[in-house]
Image: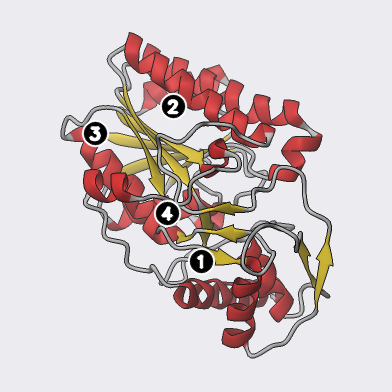
Amino acid sequence: MTILVTGGCGYIGSHMTWCLHDAGEDFIVIDNLSTGFDWAIPQATKLYEGEITDLDLLETIFKAHDISAVIHFAGSIIVPESVSNPLKYYSNNTAASRTLMEACVNHGIKHFIFSSTAAVYGDPEVIPVSEEAPLTPLSPYGTSKLMTELMLRDTAAAHDFKYTALRYFNVAGADPKGRTGQSTKNATHLIKVACEAALGKRTNLGVFGIDFDTPDGTGVRDYIHVSDLASAHYLALRRLREGGDSIVMNAGYGDGYSVLQVIDAVKAISGVDFNVTTEPRRAGDSPKVVADNRKIMKNLDWQPEFNDLKTIVDHALTWEKKLQFKNSL
């Protein structure tokens, strides 16, 4: 039985392919390579280059492979861009996911893992935020993901179809074995941007907002190592295979770090005191978002290996150095 990974050449998706590879699973990838890289996945992986909105391509894939599950990463993820171009996000995230779900139902695919986001909570009143908190996204990105969650819920109610939606908090770090990492140009992830600044790839790092209602005025986030996130997906798949019901869970550690704390950690580990500037708040940013992760810990027996900011930064910095060398060749 084969697993289809959409967006498998991207940051999180490529880590998922290595997780499946290490577990001895049979899997294939579909990716349009707009932000991903074919070299980031295991060499023998069957890659279909294209869009998940291409029904003919999906038909080809489902007929050629005995697919039992889909792990869905494909989509757009930049919050400020979603504010300025909302229709792109409703197309790439919501409408595209609907097309993929339809293909799954038509071909009897019973298990579906969805890459959702903590952005569905907006600016939560209670921290840490639980899955039962009000869903009031501040950006079209968050709304596009919430709409997909609702489609999954309704599809599961109507068909022999079970899903898990993992609401990610801030994903960071890189594969400890150095096989893949965050490689997209102009990425907006704080830890990657800070590592680029430490290596001289950027002249400065901008801090967007220093007047939030937080201890140091900068946004507070729950940073989760990308390899721990990939392992959570695999555990979620195993749970569905064992007969688990559909479920929505937070994927975070339950620890919050401010922007300035992250910058200090990157400076300390890199040994570089790079330039930091202050910028106005960005539209759609929440002051503080930290996970209540009791549900995922209970239901998946998840045991994170890299729950440490210094470790996350060290892995990210090591990958950034490797990427810098790779791009110089």
Q: Which residue is mark 4?
A: 252
> Which circle, 4 or 2, is nearer the viewer?
4
Q: CA distance from mark 3 to mark 4?
A: 20 Å
Q: Which of marks 2 and 4 precedes in the sequence?
A: 2
Q: CA distance from mark 3 to mark 1?
A: 27 Å
Display colour scheme? secondary structure
Q: For residue 173, which numbered disc appears in the image?
A: 1
Residue 73 percent across, percent down from the top left: 50, 40
Question: Cβ–Cβ below 8 Å for labels 3 and 1?
Answer: no
Residue 269 percent across, percent down from the top left: 57, 85
Residue drawn at point x = 69 percent, y = 43 percent? 79
Which amino acid type is shown beneath numbered disc 1?
Gly
> Which circle, 1 or 2, is nearer the viewer?
1
Residue drawn at point x = 48 percent, y = 53 percent? 14
Q: CA distance from mark 1 to mark 4?
A: 14 Å
Q: Which residue is mark 3?
A: 240
Q: Which of marks 1 and 3 precedes in the sequence?
A: 1
User: Viewer-proximal residue, 173 or 220?
Assistant: 220
Q: CA distance from mark 3 to mark 2?
A: 22 Å
User: Viewer-proximal residue, 28 or 259?
Assistant: 259
Q: CA distance from mark 4 to mark 2?
A: 33 Å
Which amino acid type is shown beneath numbered disc 3?
Leu
Q: Quadrant location of the C terminus?
A: bottom right
